[in-house]
Structure formats: C-alpha cells, structure tokens
Image (cartoon, rainbow, N blue to C red):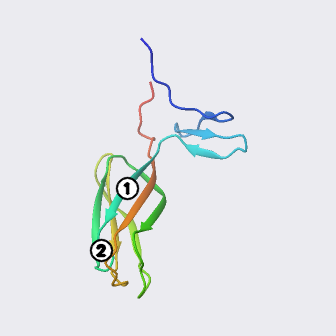
Amino acid sequence: MTGVVGLAWGGWNIKQNDDGSTSWVNVDGDAYPVARAYLTVNLENLGTASTTYVSVPYAGSIFQVDSVVHGDVTTASETLTVSIMSEVSPGRDFMAISTKGDSGADVDATIIIYFDRDQSQATFR
C-alpha cells in the first residue's frame, strides 16, 4: 500500500513547534503554518448595507483578508469588516463580513479569508 505525501518545495523543511503545531520553514528562516487554510466568499451589491455569515469548520485565527471588487466604486469608498462572531460549539466558529453600503455602487466583491487552524487540541499519532 502506498501513502500520499504532501507537496514539498526544494529548500523548505517542516518544523515541529513548541505548541505542537507544525510550520514550513524556507532557507531564509521564514515560517508558514502547515495548517493554513482559506475560505472564499462572494458578496453581492456592495452599495447596500448587509452582513454575510460564514461557518468555519475549524477553530483558529484570521491571518489575512483579501478582497476583489468586481467593478468601479466611484461615489465613496466602501468599508468591509470581517470579524469572528463566537464559538458556538467546540471547533466551529462563525465569521461575519459586513459592508456599510456607503459607495452606493451595485458591484459585487470576492473576499478571501486566510486563517490558521488551531492545532492545540489536535491529537498527534
């Protein structure tokens, strides 16, 4: 029986951290969590104030948020707010993405949320 091994880049090594998590480390010493994941969310009509809720299948923390607006926002800049709502059951968080609707522009946006999974309760075998 053969196993599946994750893709590794030349010059990168995997490191076990003190907290039990793991990181990829490159030749410059930069470390990136192995468990980094992302969610993609589409928002319709930034010109209307609204909130979209996203279920996250893992406990963790937000690392970075990117957005792509699919059109011109000309009357005012638009504010997007991404927040972690609460943990309603072990290992399941909810995020909220809100728009103020200040732009008045009927354009859509794609939001990419990068987050690191919480590995503190993981079982390593």
Provide the residue designation for mark 2: 45
Q: Amino acid at mark 1?
A: Thr
The Cα–Cα distance between marks 2 and 1, rounded to whole angstroms, is 16 Å
Looking at the picture, how far across and down is residue 1, in whole percent?
41, 11
Q: Amino acid at mark 2?
A: Asn
Q: Residues within 10 Å of mark 2 (few under 14, many from 20)?
A: some
Provide the residue designation for mark 1: 40
Count the marks.
Answer: 2
**Please, is residue 45 above or below residue 19 in the view?**
below
Q: Residue furthest bottom?
A: 75
In the picture, the quarter occupied by the C terminus is top left
Looking at the picture, how far across and down is residue 41, in whole percent?
34, 59
| Direction from residue 56 to residue 79 in the image, left or right | right
Looking at the picture, how far across and down is residue 58, in whole percent?
36, 46
Label 1's element? strand
**Residue 22: which quarter of the image?**
top right
Label 2's element? loop
**Residue 111: which quarter of the image?**
bottom left
Q: Residue at x 38, y 48 (%)?
A: 59
Marks 2 and 1: which is nearer the front?
2
Q: Residue at x 69, y 35 (%)?
A: 11
Label of residue 92 in the image: none
